[in-house]
Amino acid sequence: MRLAAVDLGATSGRVMAGTVETSGRRRLDLEEVRRFPNGGVRVAAGSGSTLHWDVLGLYREVLGGIREAGNLAGIGIDSWAVDYGLLDARGALLGNPVHYRDSRTDGVAERVHRTIPARELFSVTGLQELPFNTLYQLVSEGDRLAAAETLLLVPDLLGYWLTGSVGAERTNASTTQLYDVRSRTWAAGLAERAGIPARLLPPLREPGERIGVLRPELADELGAGPVPVVAVGSHDTASAVVAVPAGTGENFAYISSGTWSLVGLELPEPELGDAALAANFTNESGVDGTIRFLRNVMGLWVLTETLRTWAAHGQRVDLPEVLAEAAAVPALSAVVDIDAPEFLPPGDMPARISAACRRTGQRPPATRGEVVRCIVDSLALAYRRAVRQAAQLTGRTVDVVHVVGGGTRNELLCQLTADACGVPVLAGPVEAAALGNVLVQARALGADLPDLAAMRRLVRETQPLKRYEPAGGDWAVAEARLTRFRDEPAEVRA
């Protein structure tokens, strides 16, 4: 069967046509039908400005991709988490969704914690504290909430426009800090205490549930017929984890490596202890009732913003070339805390890296190769810390790290990840989110894929993978140096 996977990342989107066959010659193929840029659009707002998503532009591109994909048996949508659109009582969108990197949530978490302590929030939602969590974004809306009747996360909003059906797919709902991770329901009472009307929270859907079919006028416009739209793991990491090619019984960690890196383990139940809270781990719902126990790491955002900064200053930028330059730089010459708040907003990353190195008593990178080496070493160090903490917090052993997503193309980063973590890295597939998307669709539409093990077996049989063996290095020393600085009081650092 031929299926369209709409896979929206924070810096680009794509519509992929997937072919799945589970009888006779087993097959799992992806064909890129349409790719398009994504990113924030800054708009004047009073005396300041707000960073929005161009959601109408995304929808236009999605429709174009569906049209170009041809004869389809199904459509599924996954995207980044936490961001949303608000609908009024008529079902109309109340303004473009705001980008999670906008500054409107600055200080909001502290305000919420005066009413709902962080420990209580974590015990209910299991969510990592991030300043842009949906809960904090909604609180920052203020009086605008009075005009809203429904909240739809980005994939649910696009699904609503395609079908007219309102709902919230569970894996993405679990990223909002408004979802009770144990009872698997909306935490309506918590929402009300934070000043968020519970009426905004739509009915929950399971991955694999049919949302509806293309609205008749859309089906005519696209020449597609009444194609089913299926709820997949609509948080892109949930779909990516479906396509982790782990074998049954394998002790694995995963890194979904893209603009963000999501580093963690797959668990049967949430881990809600004080140690998990202190380590800032998150418990998000996965496909088939699993829990994605992970930490958000800043990811390749820092590298892509670095390349953008250089290009904006008129420098010719070739990623393979600068990675080759970085590979020639001695390991761990300089490292930074890649998750530090200064690396979250857009801006001049090379200047921020230099400033961070000076603050920690290190020589700032002087060449492009040194800057990129600092970034990839720092990422690998963050991966090491997250993998080891996840194992310690859950009492599990990690024998292999599976890296999926766009970061698998970065061979230097994959090798450094193996070196830092001290275990083999198995890299691939690249388009893991799109593969997980089509696998869940295929099962919902009748393919013989009864469980995650069957889906992952098909990925192993059909997708190219590359293994990296650890080669050592002074990673423990670098980690201790960085941890010591991070834990020092600000006045000591100054």
Image (cartoon, rainbow, N blue to C red):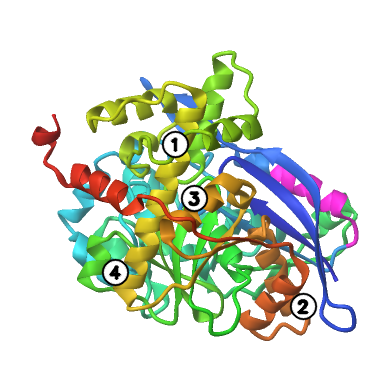
Which quadrant: the N terminus?
A: bottom right
Binning the other alpha carbons within 10 Å of mark 2 as few (below 14), some (14 to 19) or many (20 upward) gives some
> In this image, 221 relative to 445: left or right?
right
Residue 427's label in the rendered image is: none
Disc on the earlier residue, 1 or 2: 1
Residue 220, image x and y in percent? 88, 54
> Mark 3 — residue?
416
Residue 130, image x and y in percent? 33, 51
Disc on the earlier residue, 2 or 4: 4
Q: Nearer the viewer, residue 52 or 347?
A: 347
Binning the other alpha carbons within 10 Å of mark 1 as few (below 14), some (14 to 19) or many (20 upward) gives few
Using the numbered discs, state the Cα–Cα distance from disc 2 to disc 4 in whole angstroms.
36 Å
Name above or below for residue 318 compared with residue 423. Answer: above
> Mark 2 — residue?
445
Which image quadrant for residue 159? bottom right
**Which amino acid does the dot numbered 1 rest on?**
Pro
**Which amino acid does the dot numbered 4 rest on?**
Gly
Proximity of marks 1 and 2: CB atoms separated by less than 8 Å: no
Binning the other alpha carbons within 10 Å of mark 3 as few (below 14), some (14 to 19) or many (20 upward) gives many
Residue 189's label in the rendered image is: 4
**Which amino acid does the dot numbered 2 rest on?**
Leu
**Residue in view at x 35 percent, y 25 percent:** 364
Disc on the earlier residue, 4 or 3: 4
Using the numbered discs, state the Cα–Cα distance from disc 4 to disc 1 in whole angstroms.
53 Å
Residue 181 in view:
yes
**Residue in view at x 64 percent, y 42 percent:** 12
**Residue in view at x 61 percent, y 42 percent:** 55
Proximity of marks 2 and 4: CB atoms separated by less than 8 Å: no
Using the numbered discs, state the Cα–Cα distance from disc 3 to disc 2 in whole angstroms.
40 Å
Residue 330's label in the rendered image is: 1
**Residue range (magenta):** 59-71
